[in-house]
Image (tube, rainbow, N blue to C red):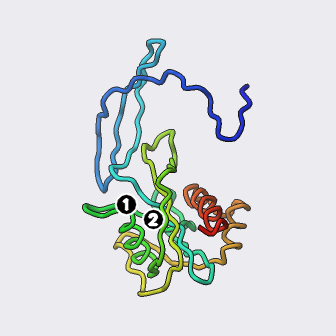
Amino acid sequence: MLKLRRGEVPAARISPQLGPEQVQLQRYGRRMFSQDFSYPDGKTADFWLFGANTRPVFIFPVTKANEVIVTWQYRHAINAWILELPGGNPKAGQTHEDVVRVELVEETGYWPRYIHIFWDRRVFVDPASLRMEGLVAVAQECELVQEPKPDGTELILPVLYDLADWVAMCDDGLISDAKSVQATRWAVNFLEKGV
């Protein structure tokens, strides 16, 4: 087994050759497709995968009082309500900064004063079956400006947690949404540096 140091990764290995995506279904900016992978030893395997046509942004919103704005949201795929950070996908003509503002105000009613997007980092939610690369943004000094107006199929209740409580909940395994836990880690490090 290799033992590596911080910042090191194993040397690149030969990757399979990818065949074309055979899209089976495409809706709401997502697609389900099959794809053949040809391996160096000559074997070929097909995989059924899901993908996104846009790059979503996962938002870590913080108020002036150092409270994290999260959503208690029903998620259809798991048939359950979970706590997670707000987020969304760009629509035609939108920048990722636009997405932070629009989604945050729609889902929570809050508007950010400052936005920092981690452009140099990528979040993969489920790289085994989901071809989607997300961004993380920190939205600072958020203020309540209106009542939330989520889309018709979104069941969302905005909730505030003190920053320390939210971080402890992530550390204690009480937050089961992986992208929210990852975004929290990066955001807390960013906020502690006072950038």
View extreme (front): residue: 195
View extreme (top): residue: 41
Give the quadrant of the N terminus: top right
> How far across and how far down the image is residue 69, in percent?
55, 75
Name the side, left or right, on which 29 lies relative to 79. left
> How far across and how far down the image is residue 2, in percent?
71, 27
Residue 186 placement: quadrant: bottom right
Give the quadrant of the C terminus: bottom right
Count of numbered labels shown in the rendering: 2
Query: What residue sits right under mark 2 in the picture?
Result: 87
Residue type of the residue flagged with mark 2 = Gly
Question: Between marks 1 and 2, how big is the CA–CA gap?
Answer: 7 Å
Judged from the image, the secondary structure of the residue bearing numbered disc 1 is loop
> How far across and how far down the image is residue 87, in percent?
45, 65
Query: What residue sits right under mark 1 in the picture?
Result: 89
Judged from the image, the secondary structure of the residue bearing numbered disc 2 is strand
